Image: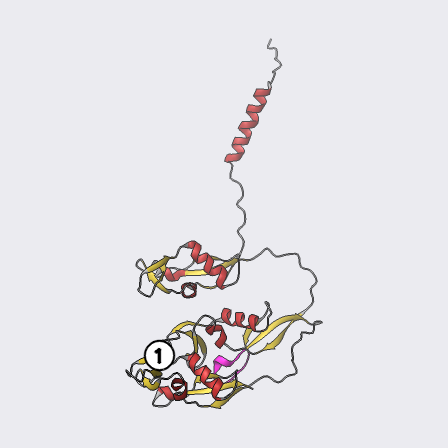
């Protein structure tokens, strides 16, 4: 007859069994953590990144990469993932932003966009109802000037562009993010944003600044004050601007631009840019808010400028 035997487990046997169980569990696939949803902030602004460092932006390596280049054309910075992340974080003012190559084109360097993760939805709490409150209008000139650039209207006066101070060539066209930044700095409110809410002959002047505020909160905003209107002051003369610098003046670039010239050699000293015309308007009409607009269509394009202000 078979007699059962009592089996004794030593401590070492128990540890061995536990180790085997843990090892098997480790090999079992764990449920993947759900990825957070993300939102596209906008395009990659490499031109802005290089310009801040005094360089130009250039596509290299058969269209695969971006590089910042010196005036000689030599590559100074070959951008990598870390640079792209930094551009997204700084340009879109979001420390959690990051770069993603989310498209597939013949020039892969153009396929980058900026994204940020959408935080998990918090438990809804009772919040006061917000309403959009108009803060007022804004000027673009200082935004370009603070980066050493000029400014002008482009695309049939529909858009603003920051331009090279010497050549007048467009460096970049201002977008929604730029206008939001202008509103925040103009009205010292980090929650301010820009809305195209008007219908003027020149569409570039249709922007206003807003902020969302609780219905019960009264902001120190002069809402009863009539909105300022774009007012044409008139035309201006360039001659005195060059003369006070002991220079002569003439039209260059197929009669498209004004230039101050050296009277001794008759060589161009510099071509007048947006900021020069703005200064001429301010002094001609004794109005520090005045600025120049290329608003006419004469046979000599250099004569197409006028002075404007908001009143």
Q: State the residue lying farthest toward the top.
A: 1
| Displayed quadrant of residue 172 | bottom left
The image position of residue 154, as x and y in percent, is: 42, 79
| Label 1: element kind | strand
The image position of residue 81, as x and y in percent, is: 42, 54
The image position of residue 292, as x and y in percent, is: 45, 84
Q: For residue 98: magenta?
A: no
Q: How many numbered markers are drawn?
A: 1
The residue under the point 40% across, 63% down is 50
Q: For residue 203: magenta?
A: yes
The image position of residue 162, as x and y in percent, is: 43, 74
Q: Which colour assignment does the render follow?
A: secondary structure
Please say whether residue 88 is visible from this viewpoint.
yes
23 in relation to 247, above or below = above
Please say whether residue 106 is visible from this viewpoint.
no
Q: Residues within 10 Å of mark 1 (few under 14, many from 20)?
A: some
309 in relation to 35, above or below = below
Name the image quarter holding the C terminus: bottom right
Which residue does the numbered mark 1 point to in the structure image?
270
30 in relation to 248, above or below = above
The residue under the point 59% across, 55% down is 120
Q: State the residue lying farthest toward the left.
A: 265
Q: Is residue 298 left or right of residue 128?
A: left
Q: Nearer the viewer, residue 34 or 46?
A: 46
| Displayed quadrant of residue 113 | bottom left
Give the prevailing secondary structure in the magenta stretch.
loop
Name the image quarter holding the N terminus: top right
What stretch of residues is rendered in magenta? 197-207
């Amino acid at each position: 007859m078979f007699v059962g035997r009592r089996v004794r487990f030593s401590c070492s046997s128990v540890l061995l069994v536990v180790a085997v169980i843990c090892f098997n569990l480790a090999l079992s696939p764990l449920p993947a953590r759900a990825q957070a949803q993300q939102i596209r902030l906008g395009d990659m602004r490499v031109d802005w990144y290089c310009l801040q460092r005094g360089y130009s932006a250039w596509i290299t390596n058969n269209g695969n990469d971006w590089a910042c280049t010196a005036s000689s054309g030599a590559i100074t910075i070959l951008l990598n993932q870390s640079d792209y992340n930094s551009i997204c974080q700084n340009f879109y003012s979001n420390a959690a932003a990051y770069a993603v190559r989310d498209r597939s084109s013949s020039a892969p360097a153009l396929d980058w966009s900026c994204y940020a993760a959408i935080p998990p939805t918090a438990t809804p709490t009772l919040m006061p109802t917000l309403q959009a409150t108009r803060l007022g209008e804004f000027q673009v000139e200082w935004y370009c000037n603070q980066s050493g650039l000029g400014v002008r209207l482009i695309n049939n006066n529909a858009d603003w562009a920051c331009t090279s101070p010497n050549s007048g060539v467009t460096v970049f066209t201002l977008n929604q993010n730029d206008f939001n930044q202008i509103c925040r700095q103009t009205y010292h409110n980090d929650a301010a944003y820009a809305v195209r809410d008007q219908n003027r002959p020149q569409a570039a002047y249709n922007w206003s600044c807003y902020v969302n505020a609780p219905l019960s909160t009264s902001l120190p905003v002069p809402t009863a004050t009539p909105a300022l209107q774009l007012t044409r002051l008139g035309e201006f003369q360039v001659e005195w601007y060059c003369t006070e610098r002991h220079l002569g003046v003439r039209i260059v670039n197929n009669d498209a631009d004004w230039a101050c010239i050296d009277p001794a050699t008759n060589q161009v000293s510099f071509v007048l840019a947006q900021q020069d015309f703005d200064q001429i308007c301010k002094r001609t009409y004794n109005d520090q808010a005045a600025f120049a607009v290329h608003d006419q269509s004469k046979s000599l394009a250099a004569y197409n400028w006028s002075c404007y202000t908001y009143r």
